[in-house]
Image (tube, helix red, strand yellow):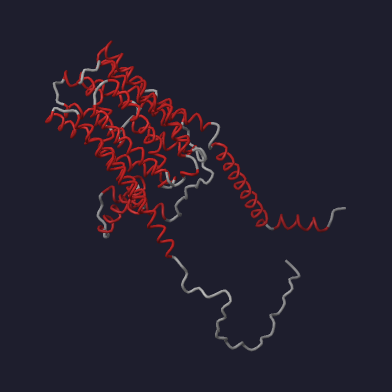
Amino acid sequence: MSCPRSHTLATLRLTNPCLNLSRLAWEEKEAVMSQGQAGERKAANAQDQGWAWMVLLAAVVLQAMTLGFPSCIGIFFTDLQRDFQASNSETSWFPSIMVAVLHGGGLGSCFSFQAGVTALGYYFVRWRTLANAMASTGVSLGFTLWPLLSQYLLDEMGWRNTFLIFGGILLNCCVCGAIMRPVQLASGSVLQSPKPGEEPRRRAEETQLSNGASSPHHELQKQSRRTACFHVLQKYLAFDIFCQNKRFQIYTIGVTWMMMGFALPHIYLVPYAIQNGVEERRAALLISVIGFINIFIRPFTGLLSGHRVFSGRRIYLFSLAVLLCGLSNFICVASAEFSVLIIYCVILSIAMSGIGALTFQVLMDVVEMDRFSSALGLFTIVESITLLLGPPLTGVLVDITNDFHYVFYNSSFFLISAALFMALSFCALEKKTRLKEASKVPVDNPSRYQYSEMPTESQPESQPPPAVVYITSI
């Protein structure tokens, strides 16, 4: 014999479809919540372990083939200058354009290394500092191997055939890009679909604007276009961050000024050594020495900067590395003997290790990670301008004076001034922040035991209690 209560509930479910719909909605909501929790667990497992290390390996190879490649251009400097009968300033446009396009935007190498740096920031959270330092060792590998390979191929095949072989080697960036599959973030947000009435109206407006049709609100359409362009620039180039974030502003200006002199020794060191009687093979070895020492120093720099003592103070380590890089250039001015140049390369390599390991890490410190890719785009575009102008302007000075010493004077000036600007600016900004926080003292805060008189309102007349309603049926 069936229970009357169960029979009644079954009858209600059959006769009232709202109960069935609510139950289905509840089950669907539970399924979505369980999928979200599973996605968060999967995202947490994807970061800092597993496939993240394959992404790190791909980033190492990418930076070796892209950022490390311009290190070998100085080896072809003399041959290009001789074959094209060009001056130092004219020849220096070749490496400066390559490096500027590599950093500031374009095709191929720029898309490769910037995407690698961004993907690495999403795959690593806890070990992000170490991962950036280890990825930057790819630049060191490139600095070590590209000059040796370049000198060998140049002697055997000439610079034209050597560049064809380089094109085939750089195609391996596609393999590294295939490894960097997207990662689902634990706090990932789902794109919100537009409201039902907004999407048709937006499409109609876009169609009207694209067809060039006249509208009674023509000025409003122009303003909307300008607003849309502004929002695109704000989203992808982080102009709003540059205007509002003082730390990002100072860091971008300092690095941009630094790049006026940072690339000069890499371009002119080999011609400078050859002009002073150093054999071509030994001159090419100087760049490889810089890269070889970088391989071991960069991970150590990453471990050091990742310590909690330097949390929030990595900008000062970066400024110290830039300062050391600028001071080391005076060694080349003192003497051009091969043994002295080896000492110069060792000190320069130690300074470059700090710069290479901390450049993107400091950028991640001053900018939120969800806007890092946009900030990186603006950061690299601005610094590419000075990377483009620095070598040719210095080449003009060398052509006028016929003295390579001015290369290292210029480099020292830009590096030292940039280091002092960043360190002092961040120090002043932190001091200002501390003073602002100290000035926020509550003024109108009554004492804990202070009594105050409060006006009392007349109590309303007593009202009868609300009636109690009993629900006896559904």
Which quadrant: the C terminus? bottom right
Q: Residue furthest left?
A: 400
Q: Is residue 25 left or right of residue 217?
A: right
In the foreground, 356 or 24: 356
Q: Is residue 64 left or right of residue 191?
A: left
The image quadrant of residue 5 is bottom right
In the foreground, 146 or 119: 146
Residue 283, how many percent across, how many down? 27, 19
Q: Vertical placement of 442 versus 140: above or below?
A: below
Q: Is residue 367 left or right of residue 399?
A: right
Q: Residue furthest top?
A: 156
Name the residue: 44% across, 52% down: 194
The image quadrant of residue 339 is top left
Marker count (numbered): 0
Residue 159, how many percent across, how many down? 25, 17
Q: Vertical placement of 399 versus 217: above or below?
A: above
Residue 231, how many percent across, how many down? 34, 51
Name the residue: 17% across, 30% down: 395
Q: Residue furthest right?
A: 1
The image quadrant of residue 407 is top left
Residue 375, how many percent across, how many down? 36, 44
In the foreground, 202 or 159: 159
In the foreground, 237 or 67: 67
